[in-house]
Image (tube, rainbow, N blue to C red):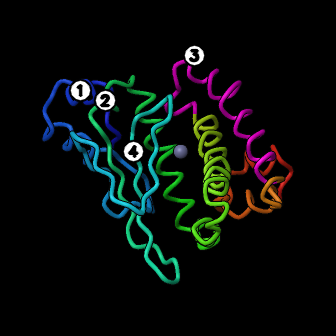
Amino acid sequence: MAQVTEADYKTAQQGDAKVRQDFLDAIDFGENCPLKERAEYQEEIKIAPPSISEFGSLTIMKFSLRLLYPDWNIGEQHLYIYRTAFHLPFNNFMSFLLHHEVHHARQNQKKDTRTFVAQMILQTAEFALFENYRLVTTEVPAYLNQVVNQDEFPLASSDLELLTQKKVPKYERKMRQLAEKLGRDWRADLSRVLCPSPFDDVVRERYNLE
Ligand SMILES: [Zn+2]
C-alpha cells in the first residue's frame, strides 16, 4: 500500500468530513498496527472516559484509549483526529500520527504498561501526581520516536527544536521529580512502558536501560 502524499493531504485539508475520513483510511499504518479501528475523523471534540487525551502544544490530535476492567485487558483503542489537526503541515501531521500516537497505541498493547496505568487509578490519594508521572513517562519515548523517524516525516525545524531542546528535557526533569515524590524508581517504570526493540532503542541508549 503506497503511503499518502502531501497532495492527498492538501485535498483533505480543503475537503469536508468525508474527504478527510477517506484520507485517513488511505494512510498506510504499517504492519501490526495496534489500532483496531484506525483513525477516525471527528468535527467536534467528544471524550469518552476512561480515556487518555492528547492536546499538546505541537499537536491537536486526540488519542483516546479505553481499557476494560478487571484484568486490564485492552478493549479497543480508538484514535480520534479533530478538525484542528488538519491545520498542521503535512510532515508534522504524519509524524504525530504514525510516530507518536501509534507509538502510544503500541505502548498500551503491553501488559506492563497497562498495569502501570492501572496503578495510577488505584493510587487515589496521589491520583493527580501519578497521572502526571504516567504522562511524562509515556510521552518521553513517544517524542523520541518521532525524532528517530525524522527521515520519514521531518518536523518543521522550529518544532523539532522545541521538542528536543524544551519538551523532552522538561519531561525528563518532571519524570525524576515526580518519581522522587511518589517514591518510584523512574528507570524501572520507564523500562516497563518501552516497546520491544528496535522500537525505543533510542530511549534505552539515552538512559542506559536494559
Ligand atoms: Zn503523546
Q: Going from the N terminus, do you reach mark 3 or mark 1 first? A: 1
Residue where numbered disc 2 is placed: 86
User: Is label 3 or label 4 in front?
Assistant: 4
Residue 129 lies, in percent from the top left, at 67, 53
* Type of the residue with mark 1: Gln
- What range of the chain is rendered magenta? 150-179
- Does the numbered disc 4 mark a residue whose Cβ is under 8 Å from ligand 1? no
Q: Which residue is drawn at 33% across and 52% down?
A: 47
- Secondary structure under badge 2? helix
Q: Which residue is drawn at 49% across and 83% down?
A: 70
Q: From this view, report whether residue 201 is shown above or below residue 185.
A: above
Q: How far apart are marks 2 and 4 (CA)?
A: 12 Å
Magenta stretch: residue 48 in it?
no
- Secondary structure under badge 4? strand
Residue 10 lies, in percent from the top left, at 25, 24
Q: From this view, report whether residue 210 is shown above or below residue 25.
A: below
